[in-house]
Image (cartoon, rainbow, N blue to C red):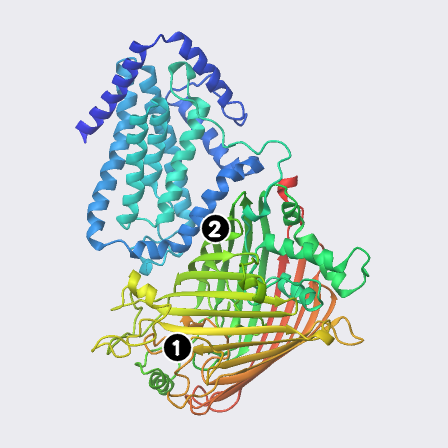
Amino acid sequence: MALWIFAVVFGFVLADSQAHAQTDPQPPLLGLAEKQSSSHENQPTFLPAGEDPENRLLTPFMKHVALDQKQFWTAPFHLHREDARLLLPFAAFTGALFAGDSWISRQVPVSQVHRSVILSNYLTYSFIGVTGASYLWGHFVHNDRLRETGLLAGEAAFNSVATAYLLKAVTQRPRPFQDNGNGTFFQGGSSFPSEHAAIAWSVASVVAHEYPGRLTELAAYGLASAVTVTRVTGKQHFASDAVIGSALGWYFARQIYRAHHDPELGGAGWGNFDVGSDIGEKVRNPENMGSPYVPIDSWVYPAFNRLIALGAVQSADLGIRPWTRMECARLLEEAREQLGDDADRDSEAEKTYHALAEEFADETRGQNGEENLGVHLESVYTRLMGISGSPLRDGYHFGETITNDYGRPYGAGFNNVTGVSGYADTGPFFYYFRGEYQHAPGVPSDSPYTLQAIANADLTLPIPNAIPSYDRFRIVEGAFGFNFHNLQMSVGKQGWWLGPGDSGPLLLSNNAESFLMLKLDNISPYRVPLLSDVLGPIRTEYFLGQLSGTQFELNGTTLLGPGNIKPQPFVDGFKISFKPTSNLEIGMGATAMFAGPGLPFTLPNFIKTFYSHTNEGPTVTGNNPAKRASAADVSYRVPHLRDWLTFYCDSLAVDEVSPIGSSRPVLNPGIYMPQLPKLHKFELRAEGIHEPLYSGFAPGFVYYGLRRYRSGYTNDGQLLGNWIGRAGRGGQAWLTYSSSPRNKFELGYRVQEVSTRFIGGGRSVDYSARAEKMVTREFGVSGFLQYEQWNFPLLVPGRQTDFTTSFQLTFYPTRQSNKHK
């Protein structure tokens, strides 16, 4: 390492001497001083801005460190909207890394770990050695520039490491080789962020600006990047830990160099975050504006449902949700044209329109060509929920007391979720984040008799199914992406709702926890020549992601499990929707589970998921290349009752091209009345679900139960589709009174029956009441009561009951965007 340090320091001295020998120093230094002075103009006033650098050890150094820390921790209070141009893409990128940390870490070959650890340590110690050697050698040979390089690099490294260790103490994230590699925060650990990466980027950034040049920058940043990568491949840190650590080092180097660098010594200037803005009153194309998706559980969708059913919105696709905020603004412009300027402001359609128009005011300005640039705090919320009695927790075999709730844990006793959501957009990019603390009591395991019966139904082995108590922070949704001509690509954890009803689509819903995915989405309807002349505008989506929680898998004729199967299966799918008329919507879609042990994710295997349903090879019985589910849905506003009645139906078939024409489809028909005759403030919706029993298979085996993936069509054990589960039938109905679009009272009824031929059968009935009230413009409260009766003899003999109460308080920041402040 001594030779490496000597070589680097000698290179700096040589570069410095060559620069002085080849040029007349005075004119360039004067020009550089003027340039550097301008680069300090926007520096916070509590930092010395290059006028008197005082780059000395002891008292000046400690004073600078205190000011550096003050600047770092108060920086969020000094942000400007232009900063979003840089901060938003970085936040989006790191957010995606957080969502994929565990998966990325699992891809690192074991053979790379030891080698990476040695290399990252060697490079980091080398950076530290370069810092000290630069200062000392510069002091001895009276080279002020080299001495300043060592001092500023040391100051940046000291600040970034101090900040990293403070964040480690607060976040307590286990390293990838601890806690099963889950990367959950607040579990006791020191992974977040990486101090090695912070040191490397602190030193490299200062060196690259003190001695600008292609070769110096390539060497400095290249070696720093090597430290970042090897901390991940050495399984010492998750990818987000290393990236955040690198950003800390770069940030402190930037601030310290700009504040304390003496421009008369040479070196390059370091500009501001502002990368410039559009000039003049340029009209921007909304088709190229990135926009976050509206969460599936938002009040926005019931409001739009009502506008659609009342005929005010005619181009929306109910079978493909979520929608982006920009798409919602486009639909509102359509509604304004349909309603007209002379519409009755007291009508339900007008009141609903105005509530939505307030929500999407910024996006409406974007539709008119204004710039989309801002960071928004969407909501801060807490939900307190108590459950007495014995709730149902296993929808794959029996039923669920709480459905369509992003897979949040719950149990008898006190439950809580407290979270925050926000989004940002700049030009074609967007970022969305919702994270929350979740608490739920533990759930004991079923009896050995029950476990054996479940294993018999699944053709697996009996394993305890106790659920531990939860106290964790969880990313509910977190995604970033960009948009080009209304084709939006996004990566992250995202919710889905691929069907027209409210009880839960058969293909994909938010009943289970969202999973990490890549999504391609035509966010607005478009026309295809000739085809659209018959079928009308088209909207399409495609996704590819990886599931978790699979416990059993059939690899050929060998049953794998119990245990966490590696690798976990992937799932991909698509949905396409047509609007032949303003009253008719037709949708078709499919998903496929594939890959896993013995069936690697290769291009040929991936392509087979789109067409193949058969076993292959003489010894791979049951080793399907994919398990496909296909869906079709239709929604129709009855012409003579167009403001009163909408009929829709969702359907699903397994291992068939389409449910249309199938002899064994699952059906979920429904009706929706946006207002009742003479009672315009009331809405009524009712849906029924039926899964037929197929004589060729055991009950519960065909649809959400699968051949190869014995843990079923689930993510972390919860159904990806409708809550009705296997071998079941039932229905759900709601009667809603709305005093305004955001103040409602709703009565609900839900019933489920499971065939007696499937693990003894059973029945559950729920009666519920829900109220939502906006107390002020920013604060909303909601309450929920549910009484449930159920009887599944295999679980517990006799009828059981449970009672659920919940209260939620939500803060919605003012609708005025910060980008107009």
Q: In the image, is 328 to the left or to the right of 241?
A: right
- Is label 2 in a helix, a strand or a loop? strand
**Residue 395 in view, yes or no:** no
**Residue in front for this viewpoint, 90 or 184:** 90
Residue at 58% x, 61% y is 537
Residue at the front extreme, as displayed? 530
Res 159 seen here: yes
Closer to viewer: mark 1 or mark 2: 1
Please state the horizontal and vertical placement of residue 399, each as a whole percent of the image: 49, 80
Quadrant of image for the N terminus: top left
Q: Is residue 257 above or below residue 106?
A: above
Expressed as whole percent of the image width and height from the top left, the position of residue 187 reads 39, 57
Vertical side of 190 occupied by 724: above or below:
below
Q: Position of residue 297 (x, y in %)?
A: 58, 64
Q: Is residue 718 left or right of residue 282?
A: left
- Front in this rendered view, residue 660 or 489: 660
Residue, disc 2: 480
Which amino acid type is shown beneath numbered disc 2?
Answer: Phe
User: Which residue is located at x 36 percent, y 22 percent?
Assistant: 210
Label 1–label 2 contact, CB within 8 A: no
The residue sitting at 46% across, 84% down in the picture is: 664
Q: Is residue 795 left or right of residue 615?
A: right
Looking at numbered disc 1 in the image, what kind of residue is underneath it?
Asp
Q: Position of residue 431 (x, y in %)?
A: 51, 49
- The quadrant of the rendering that contains the C terminus is top right
Residue 675 or residue 483, whichever sits in front: 483
Q: Is residue 103 above or below residue 147?
A: below
For disc 1, the marked residue is: 655
Residue depicted at x 43% and y 34%? 251
Mark 2 neighbour density, 10 Å: few (under 14) some (14–19) many (20 or more): many
